[in-house]
Image (spheres, rainbow, N blue to C red):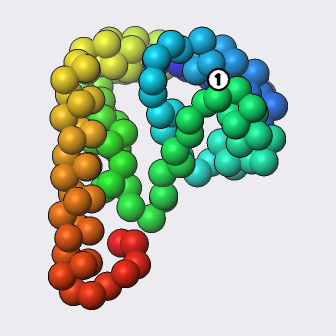
Amino acid sequence: MLFIKKEKYAINAQVYIRDILQGYIEPLDGDYTFVQDGTTAHTARQTMEYCRENGIDVKTQSPKSPDLNPIEMIWANLKRKVEKRRPDSKARLIAAIQESWDEISFEEVQNSILKVKNERASRSLKRKENGVNKLI
């Protein structure tokens, strides 16, 4: 979990590349796909070019189907865990978020991904059955 103080600087493509992609994503080893939302810094031409040039396989999630985005399930779980801690200050909120994040297991993340894959497959099958050829 990475906390970025928004008042420190705006997140634009240059900052995103320097602080996130170069600092955290690029050093990862293995075969993976980096999933991000459609925030301007994420989808900027400069960001996408950087990813292509550096072999970062990127998938951008559609904002129109948050139920098909596994991270939304994780955020909901994180929110429930943090609320149970009832933080009463900014410092305690940050600590509660970090502690709650650390409690989320790899299995929970995998299950969220599998649920989304199954839902996508189910929707795709329904579209084919109904003769609809557009994404939901």
Report crowding for label 1: few under 14, some 14 to 19, many 20 or more residues within 10 A (C-alpha). Answer: few
**Mark 1, residue position:** 20
Q: Which amino acid type is shown beneath numbered disc 1?
A: Ile
| Image: 23 above or below 79 | above
Give residue 110's quadrant in the image: top left
Give residue 134's quadrant in the image: bottom left
Identify the residue at horizontal 38%, vertical 61% (top origin): 65
- Residue 36 visible in the picture: no
The x and y percentages for residue 117 are 25, 49
Give residue 112's quadrant in the image: top left
Q: Nearer the viewer, residue 36 or 120?
A: 120
Q: Quadrant of the C terminus?
A: bottom left
The x and y percentages for residue 100 are 29, 18
Identify the residue at horizontal 29%, vertical 25% (top origin): 82
The x and y percentages for residue 57 are 56, 35
Q: Is residue 49 left or right of residue 43?
A: right
Q: Nearer the viewer, residue 90 or 48?
A: 48
For mark 1, give the secondary structure. Answer: helix
